[in-house]
Image: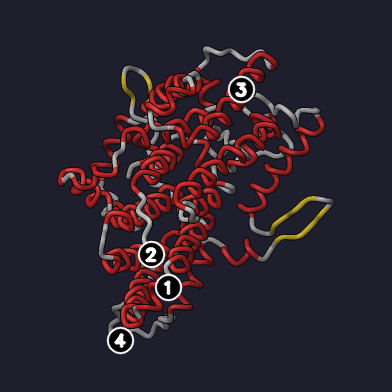
């Protein structure tokens, strides 16, 4: 729930996030040097292709270390390469988790408590963040930040997939789904376009994947539409700041329509402007929206700079901040505090650090999960998790941190074990 602030807590002089990366680095090395015969005993046989991809990625990392004369013992080296080490938590989660765990009453209670987190996120992010929590992180963490939209979106997706796979009564799932998604969509629209689109796509995918269920339950479909629409309307009005109470003496004209409230939220984030403002100028993709254009400028500079330096193959390496972030001709990339190093894209971060070779390898790495899933279940339900995550991370810095990839990979491993193939 507290994401970045939580991983910034210091233990023995190290931030929790640094300790997590360190532990996962060691775990990755153990997994990479496992014998093939050990895969079966650890129940990791289905991930043999995935682990082989990770081995080649690690080999490319070692090549980069020597090629760029990188200090292997510097914490900065492993900070900038954390996107490699975080992936191993998936195998750890898969090995530990057992399908019958959900029959344990204590674990079941913990899972149901987890289902409350999206609602807590909604309250905390819409004006009810407790001061004592804020004071705690200001005092003990290296940095206090409010919950990022991408973390809210991921928890929303995870909580719904958890309930879908542990709840035998699908109507209970759809009531929860029809409450949490419409509740948080207006908030995400105001906070982040990428996270909003990811959550909206998750909503659409769930409906499409369960279309047959809705067709065979027309009365429940009508209830679902009315219920979810009502939640969306109330949440939209609340997030837009429209008050339901006006005294009779007030002559203020307020747009009480849902479309008016959505427009008000969208205007705060200039959503329509961003979607419809792309054009070509001097051979570059440009946008009238400042935030979108700022990111487009960075991404295109990464490609152009790597190309000019003949570094597209191996990238910049892990020694230092990417040069394009300190370009004097493009001030402001380091942020107001001068500490931002992120290019705000999982794709361009991999390209910048490990080059086109590593980008291709990571593409194969992620597709190998889809392949392993399809071989076992003969369906595409894994896309319910992966599509929203990677759509969002393509335009955000979430996979460059600790908390987001940790949550994603951990649940990915759990999802492989937890999943039950239900008829739609």
Q: Between marks 3 and 4, how big is the CA–CA gap?
A: 69 Å
Q: Of the residues under marks 3 and 2, which one precedes in the sequence?
A: 3
Q: Quadrant of residue 182?
A: bottom left
The residue where tag 3 is placed is 61
Who's the residue at 39% across and 39% down the image?
410
Instruction: Between residue 150 and residue 101, name the one nearer to us.
Output: 101
SS of the residue at dot 1? helix
Q: Which residue is mark 4?
A: 249
Verify CB contact (< 8 Å) between mark 3 and mark 1.
Answer: no
Q: Earlier in the sequence, mark 2 or mark 4?
A: 4
Q: Nearer the viewer, residue 14 or 94?
A: 94
3 or 4: tag closer to the N-terminus: 3
Residue 109: tell me if it is visible: yes
Q: Which residue is mark 1?
A: 212
Q: Which mark is residue 423?
A: 2
Cα–Cα span, label 2 and label 1: 9 Å
Picture coordinates of residue 25, whole percent (x, y)? 46, 22
Instruction: Label 4, secondary structure: give it.
Output: loop
Q: CA distance from mark 2 to mark 4?
A: 57 Å
Decide which of tag 2 and tag 1 comes sooner along the chain: 1
Q: Quadrant location of residue 24?
A: top left
Marks 3, 4: nearer the viewer? 3
Circle 2 residues within 10 Å: few <14, some 14–19, many ≥20: few
Image coords of residue 98 (percent x, y): 29, 39
């Amino acid at each position: 729930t507290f994401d970045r602030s939580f991983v910034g807590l210091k233990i023995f002089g190290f931030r929790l996030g640094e300790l997590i990366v360190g532990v996962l680095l060691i775990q990755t090395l153990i997994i990479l040097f496992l014998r093939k015969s050990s895969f079966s005993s650890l129940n990791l046989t289905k991930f043999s292709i995935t682990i082989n991809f990770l081995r080649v990625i690690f080999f490319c990392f070692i090549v980069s270390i020597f090629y760029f004369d990188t200090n292997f013992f510097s914490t900065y080296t492993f900070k900038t390469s954390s996107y490699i080490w975080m992936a191993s938590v998936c195998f750890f989660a898969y090995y530990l988790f057992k399908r019958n765990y959900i029959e344990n009453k204590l674990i079941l209670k913990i899972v149901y408590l987890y289902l409350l987190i999206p609602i807590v996120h909604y309250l905390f992010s819409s004006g009810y963040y407790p001061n004592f929590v804020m004071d705690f992180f200001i005092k003990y963490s290296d940095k206090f930040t409010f919950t990022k939209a991408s973390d809210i979106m991921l928890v929303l997706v995870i909580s719904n997939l958890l309930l879908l796979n542990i709840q035998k009564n699908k109507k209970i799932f759809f009531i929860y789904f029809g409450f949490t998604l419409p509740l948080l969509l207006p908030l995400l629209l105001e906070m982040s376009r990428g996270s909003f689109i990811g959550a909206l796509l998750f909503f659409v995918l769930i409906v499409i994947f369960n279309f047959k269920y809705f067709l065979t339950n027309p009365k429940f479909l009508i209830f679902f539409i009315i219920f979810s629409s009502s939640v969306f309307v109330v949440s939209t009005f609340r997030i837009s700041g429209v008050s339901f109470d006006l005294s009779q003496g007030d002559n203020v004209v307020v747009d009480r329509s849902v479309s008016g409230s959505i427009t008000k939220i969208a205007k705060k984030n200039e959503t329509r402007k961003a979607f419809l403002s792309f054009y070509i100028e001097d051979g570059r993709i440009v946008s009238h929206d400042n935030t979108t254009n700022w990111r487009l400028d960075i991404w295109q500079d990464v490609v152009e700079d790597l190309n000019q330096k003949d570094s597209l193959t191996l990238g910049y390496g892990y020694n230092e901040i990417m040069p394009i972030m300190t370009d004097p001709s493009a001030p402001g990339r380091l942020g107001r505090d001068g500490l931002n190093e992120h290019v705000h894209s999982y794709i361009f971060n991999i390209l910048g650090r490990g080059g086109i070779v590593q980008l291709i390898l990571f593409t194969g790495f992620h597709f190998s999960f889809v392949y392993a899933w399809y071989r076992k279940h003969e369906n595409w339900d894994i896309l319910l998790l992966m599509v929203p995550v990677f759509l969002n991370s393509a335009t955000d810095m979430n996979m460059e941190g600790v908390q987001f990839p940790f949550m994603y990979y951990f649940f990915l491993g759990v999802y492989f074990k937890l999943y039950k193939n239900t008829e739609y």
